Each structure stands twice: as C-alpha cells, then as structure tokens.
Amino acid sequence: MAESKKYISQEDLSKHNKPGDLWISIQGKIYNVSDWANYHPGGELPLLNLAGQDVTDAFVAYHPGSAWQHLDQFFTGSYLEGYSVSEVSKDYRKLINEFTKMGLFENRGLGVHFSLFLVAMLFSLSVYGVLYSDSTWVHLGSGGLMGFLWIQSGWHGHDSGHYQIISSKRLNRFAQILTGNCLAGISIAWWKRNHNAHHIACNSLEFDPDLQHMPFFAVSSKLFNSLTSYFYDRKMNFDAFTRTLVSYQHWTFYPVMCLARLNLFAQSFLLLSSKRLRVNNRVQEILGLLVFWIWYPLLVSCLPNWGERVMFVVTSFSVTGIQHVQFCLNHFSSSVYVGTPIGNDWCENQTNGSLDIECPSWMDWFHGGLQFQIEHHLFPRLPRGNLRKVAPLVKELCKKHKLPYKSVSFLKANELTIGTLRTAALQARDLASPVPKNLVWEAVHTYG
C-alpha cells in the first residue's frame, strides 16, 4: 500500500525562516537547508531572505540542471499544501528550458577573451604612459585609461560572479581575483555577497544593499522612517545630518559617483576583516587586495609631482564613476517596496524593479550587459553576449502577463534617476516632521 504524503501549510512553512531553522519549498517539496546555509556557494543571505516560502523560480534562475540532484539530501519528506504554479511562472520556466536546450547558458562566445585582452591592453598603456612619458597630458590620459580598465574589470567581476566566464573553475577563480582584487582593489567575495543579496531582494528598501546609501542618497521618502537594513544589520537613521545631505542629493549625485570607488574599497576591507561573517578563501582575497595596494600606489608615486599624482588618481576615479552611475540607472527610478522579498513573485519583482537602457549593438561593450537589466535579472546565469538574443522573448513574456518592461535611452535614464532623487530631496526639505539629532556618521556600513 502506497504511503500517503505528508503536507505542511504555508503558514507552518513560514515559521522556518530564522538562522538555524531554514526551510524552503521547491516545486512543492519541502527542504531543510539550515546547515547548508554555511556552505551555500551563493552565501547564506539568499537562503535567509527567502526562507519559509516557495523559491522555485529563484532556484531555477540561479542554478543549472545539475543542481537538482543535490536536493534529495535536504528533503524533509513533506510537501507544501495547496502548492500551485502561476501562469507567468509556467511560461518563465519554459523559457529557461528553451534557453538550456539552445545552449545559451553555456555559449559565452569570444567576447570574454577579447575583453580580457582589452583589460591587459588598457593596463599596459596606462603603465607605459606613466613610466615612459614626461607629458602631463599623457599622464592625464593614463589616468583615464586606468579608469576604463577598472570599468572593464568590473564587468568581468559581475559576469564571473553569476557564471563561469572560463570553462575551468580554477581559471575562472584566477580571473576573478586578478581582474577584481589585484587590478581593481575590489574583493570579489564582497561583490558576490552584495550582488546576490541585490538580485534576490531587488529594490526592497530593507533587504537590497544597492538602495541603502544613506546618508548620501535616499530614493524614496519611505527611507525617512529610519528603516532597518537587514543586509548591514543596522538601522538606517534619517537624522538631521542625513536630511541635509539628502536635500541636495540631485546636485551631489554625479560628484559623489566620482568618488564612489572609495566606498567599494572600504566595504572590501570591512568584509575581509570581519570576524562575524564567513568569507570563503579569505586569505586569497586579502592577498589579492594587497597586490593592488602595492602596485597602484607605486605607479602613482612614479609621477613627477604631487599635482600630477592627484590628477591621475582623481581622473581614474572619475572615469570609473561612469560605471557607478550605470549601476544606479537600472534601479533608482524603478518601483521600490518595504518588506521581505517574495519568492513566488519572482518575475513580478524583477521586472518592477529594473530598467533597460536602449542602445545599438555596437555600444554593448560600454554598458557591459546592464542595458538588458530586465533580461539579466530574470536570467542571471545568461552570459551577457546572449542577452540581446533573448530580449524579444522576454518582451513577449512581459506583454502576455502584463508585466512592466521599461526601456529608455541612456540620457532618459539619467533624467529619471535625477528626477527620483530630486523628488525625495524636496520631500526631505519639508521640516514639518522632526527628525532625531545628528548621530554623526553613518556613511560607512559597518560589518562588525
């Protein structure tokens, strides 16, 4: 006689959403991933943020077919009561199957090798200009080339954090450390932790770190309520100091972006020095950063005077600021919400919180795949060279299920972003609502 299935309700499942007690549902089967959270390649945050609910769409978005064979060891023997699949999720999963059959998740093309060659050329030209020229203009251009190098290395870090840009895992890891830690001074471990949390909780004011930039920026007046950041595990205080900065954020946005790299340096050090957070290959990550902090200061010191040294650093930071602006354009002007990300509204959350940038194919190198942000958020494992190919199919999916598909020019995206910041700035200037006294400094997110 066949054994009857055991079921648990969504209400009971939702109670298993705390560290040490993490249950999830995938296709209606209940899995206990409490212990796995410490070993999950994507970090513990995606599991913590989505625990206690069905996460099928997020799972298929982030995992290849080979991952399914590992699920049985976590199966509790229970099933989710009343489990059903929405029409949009059915079509979404069909698209993933189609893309898999077409080999789109594996076909990385020749673009990776060309961009790696471009990184090497930019580095060589920048160093050559500093060491073998006495011209101030050449030194200025070398600083600009260094900024473009960091932009290209940023695309590699972004891509390699989502999928293997090189078939060998060891070579892929080497490319991550080389282009991220060694050449750009940014920890790939920090990037993956931050970016995975962003994807899972796209545009949640409490869970998405890419929207948590107070005291400098607030994209919504909802942040004036001093919400809690569950990524940084601290309260985002909207005090008098923050109000003052936010009141002028639409004017300070571009200048701050020119120096935004300083925050990435700080975040990398804070994560790698934290005793509270688990970091895979911590020593390897630290050594990579040490390489950067040896060669970059040495290169700058080779310039003939302090004026040119400052010029070189400011130019390299300002040029790479373009990329920091690009990261903001895709989300700052999109819909935001307060609360925990919902696993079974994957398509709705990703399309509501993302914005595409219209551009011709010959400008794809400039945007690094971010111009297809909706496609990328729905299919994060898809190599950026294939995003343009699937865009028409994604448009059809959104049209069929009445999901937003917003695509504007680069200029318009800037206008929308500044407009969003201006709206919040004017709301912050309303002194009718009192705020706490200045808590002095909340700029650097503390890991502990």
Image (cartoon, rainbow, N blue to C red):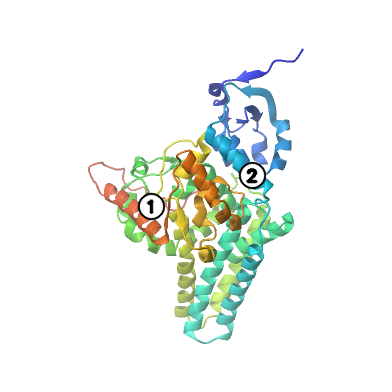
**Left or right of 124, for residue 304:** left
Q: How many C-alpha atoms fall within 10 Å of the one at disc 2: few (<14), some, or many (≥20)?
A: few
Examine the rendering and report whether any part of residue 383 can be seen: yes
Q: Nearer the viewer, residue 320 or 61?
A: 61
User: Callout 2: helix, strand or loop?
Assistant: helix
Residue 240: x %, y % from top left:
30, 48
* 1 or 2: mark nearer the eye: 2
The vertical placement of 84 against 303, above or below, is above
> Which comes before the other along the chain, label 1 or label 2?
2
User: Callout 1: helix, strand or loop?
Assistant: loop
Amino acid under label 2? Glu
Instruction: Tell me the tag on residue 217.
Output: 1
**Left or right of 99, for residue 337:** left
Image quadrant containing the N terminus? top right
Examine the rendering and report whether any part of residue 207 can be seen: no
Residue 86: x %, y % from top left:
53, 31
Residue picked out by circle 2: 98
Q: Nearer the viewer, residue 21 or 160?
A: 160
The residue that appears at 24% across and 46% down in the rendered structure is 430
The vertical placement of 6 against 167, above or below, is above
